[in-house]
Every structure is written in structure tokens, then in C-alpha cells.
Amino acid sequence: MTAAVLGNIITDTTDWLADFSANWWFLVIIFAVSYFDSVIPIVPSETMVIIGGVAAGQGDQHVLAVIACGAVGAFLGDNTAYLIGARLSGFIDRLIEKRPKWRARLDAAADQIRYRGGLLLITARFIPGGRTALTVSSGITHQPRRWFVGWVAIAAVIWATYAALLGFLGGKAFEDNHTLAFLVAFVAAVSITLLIELVRHLRARYA
């Protein structure tokens, strides 16, 4: 595939995304994807919120509406994941009843969540898959519900604001170039996610 053909594909795709994200019902998609990504970590929620932010930057959506839909969807999804974990806790307890090593690991996880849980919930929201693992684990280990709800609310707002503003700034900076606006926002999002994961890995390794 030549560079020209690839360039045309990227341009056509981003132009289609620009038209697609300009519709009012794209906000519903942002909400739904943010919700399901919290429960099934294979849905690209950051991508949808960033696209919504780009659309807002180019005048097709309102950035506060994008943030609200992403945050509310993520918040409800995190609470659903917690409830799934809570429902599974009895089964997990029976499963590890005769496995001391598994019990020790689960107890260690519970201690870590209690000790660093708030910051962990915020950090994990930026790591695809990591947020689901932590929210389900919070339910399994019976973390206080009120405490959990408060922290995931903060995490969801921070996450949605970051992703939407990232797209918004890209959309504002390149209002006449949809392709460049999307690419800049996506590359920035991927870079930040990788940086967060690297810092987390280094802290865990040298802690």
C-alpha cells in the first residue's frame, strides 16, 4: 500500500468521523461506549470521548455535554462492575477456601485497595482493562460502597474532562483540517496513556 493510498484512507476516515460526530445522537454513543467499556474492557471509550472533543472544538458539539456524557457513562459503568464483583464474592470465597496462596493474594489486594484505593481508582481509569479489574476487585473485596462511589465519581470526571479537552484543543487548533485534528488528539492520548503505564510500572518495580 503506497503512502498516497494510506493518506487517502486516513483522510476519508477522519472526514467520515467528522460528519458522524457532528450529530446530536453521537453524545448518546459516547455515554453508551463509556458505560460498556467500564464493564467489558474492549470498547474504545477514550476514542469516542476524544472524537466528541474534536467535534466540540470544531463547533459541532458542546464540550461540556461531551464531558458529561463520558463521565456519567463511566461512573455508572464502574458501579456496575463493582456490583458484578460483589455478586461474585461468594463464589470467589468458596473457590479459594482451600487455596491459602489465593486467599493471601486476595487479602493483599484488599489491603492495597484500602491503603491506596482512591488514587488507584483515579490512575486505573486511564488504563484500559485496569479500571475494570480494579472496580470488580473492589466489589469482590467488599470495599465500602459510599467510599467507592465518591472516588469513581472523581475519577470519571477527571478522565472525561482530560479526554474531551484533548480532542477539543486539537479541534480548535486545526479547525480547517479534520485529519490533523484527529491525529494530533489520538497521538497525544496514546502517548499520555503509555507514559502513565510506564510510571506505574516503574513505581511498582522500585517500590
Image (tube, rainbow, N blue to C red):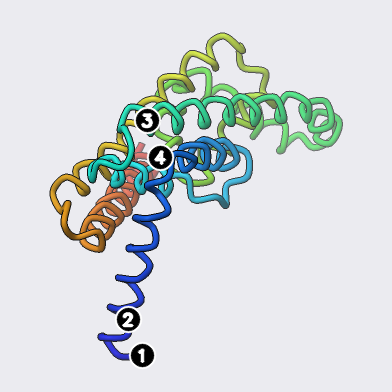
Residue at image mark 2: 6
Q: CA distance from mark 1 to mark 2?
A: 7 Å
N-terminal-most mark, 4 or 3: 3
Residue 203 rendering spot, x and y as whole percentages: 34, 40
Foreground pick, 11 / 190: 11
- For the C terminus, the image quarter is top left
Residue occupying the point 45% across, 33% down: 70
- From the viewer's perspective, is 48 left or right of 179? right
Residue at image mark 1: 1
Residue occupying the point 39% across, 40% down: 204
N-terminal-most mark, 3 or 2: 2
N-terminal-most mark, 2 or 4: 2
Q: CA distance from mark 4 to mark 1?
A: 34 Å
- For the N terminus, the image quarter is bottom left
Would you call the spot at circle 2 few (<14 residues within 10 Å), some (14-19), or many (20 or more)? few
Secondary structure of the residue carrying numbered label 2: helix
Where residue 95 sits, quadrant-wise, is: top right
Where residue 92 sits, quadrant-wise, is: top right
N-terminal-most mark, 4 or 1: 1
Residue 205 rendering spot, x and y as whole percentages: 38, 45
Q: Which mark is residue 74?
A: none
Amino acid tagged 4: Phe
Amino acid tagged 2: Leu
Residue at the outermost left position: 173
Of marks 2 and 4, the one in the foreground: 2
Residue at image mark 3: 67
Q: Which mark is residue 126?
A: 4
Foreground pick, 136 / 190: 190
N-terminal-most mark, 1 or 2: 1
